[in-house]
Amino acid sequence: MFVVGIGPGSLEDLSPRARAALACSDLVVGYQLYLDLLGEVIAGKQTFSSGMTGEVERTQHAVEQAANGLTVSVVSSGDAGIYGMASLVMELAARSQAKVDIEVVAGISALNAAAARLGAPLTHDFAVISLSDLLTPLETILRRVEAAAAADFVIVIYNPKSRQRTKPFEDAVSILRKHRAGATPVGVVRNATRADESVRITTLSDMDREDIDMLTTIIVGNSTTYVYEGRMITPRGYQL
């Protein structure tokens, strides 16, 4: 059984190891958008999908089918071990005591893809925080934002906000502004590597004016990050 990180969206960023895992699979399981992104790579394969909140259902199905002898790939966007399906597959396999071998296939994460589009914002210590409070209490999320902001980490923000869920983003921005100058560079990347990709660089003062949704990855610079010719740069510390 494979848990496959398919990268941020473009088939050019799908690794040879991921392609090989998908090629030898009898069944490919995942959120329908991710199956659609794979297109010809899984043409003719048996697939199983469910909605955005159907992770447990489809993972249970995948584990059951793997235990019954099928070669199964569960796909995640980006890297399956970063806010992905790897832990859920392992948790459900352990809970059911399923006798399946699980191999996690690494993928390019949204933070890697977004950083590359922006320049070099992650070349020093950074923290990654999801603002989705579906599985994590909001107070825990905000405590982590506070700690990372105070420690001067570059901060990567996943799942910033949706139409119905705006408070975590609003609260996080308020916390960041307590610890960072308003001119701090902020990168806003939506749908990195996909057909409708957008890449913008703004500032902490203006970041909440941007068009931001669940498909957006945000990178907030630290106290040394600057912008040169449209690129975010976080110095590594070399003496130049």
Image: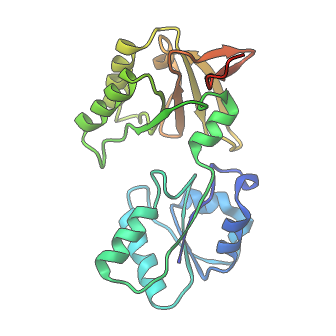
User: Is 236 left, or right, of 92 in this rendering?
Assistant: right
Where residue 169 appears, as percent x and y from the top left, is: 37, 28
Where residue 192 appears, as percent x and y from the top left, is: 64, 40
> Which quadrant of the structure image shows residue 37?
bottom right
Nearest the viewer among 191 and 223 is 223
Q: Residue at x 70, y 58 (%)?
A: 14
- Image quadrant for the C terminus? top right
Residue furthest front as drawn:
239
Where residue 51 appears, as percent x and y from the top left, is: 44, 59
> Which quadrant of the structure image shows residue 40?
bottom right
> Which quadrant of the structure image shows residue 95?
bottom left
Q: Residue at x 57, y 27 (%)?
A: 188
Colouring convention used in this rendered image of the protein: rainbow
Residue 57 in view (yes/no) = no
Q: Residue at x 51, y 32 (%)?
A: 125
Where residue 178 appears, as percent x and y from the top left, is: 35, 13
Above or below for 17 versus 219: below
User: Is 117 left, or right, of 77 in this rendering?
Assistant: right
Above or below for 194 versus 139: below
Residue 120 in view (yes/no) = yes
Q: Residue at x 76, y 53 (%)?
A: 12
Above or below for 102 versus 147: below
Numbered disc total = 0
User: Is 152 left, or right, of 116 in this rendering?
Assistant: left
Residue furthest bottom as drawn:
69
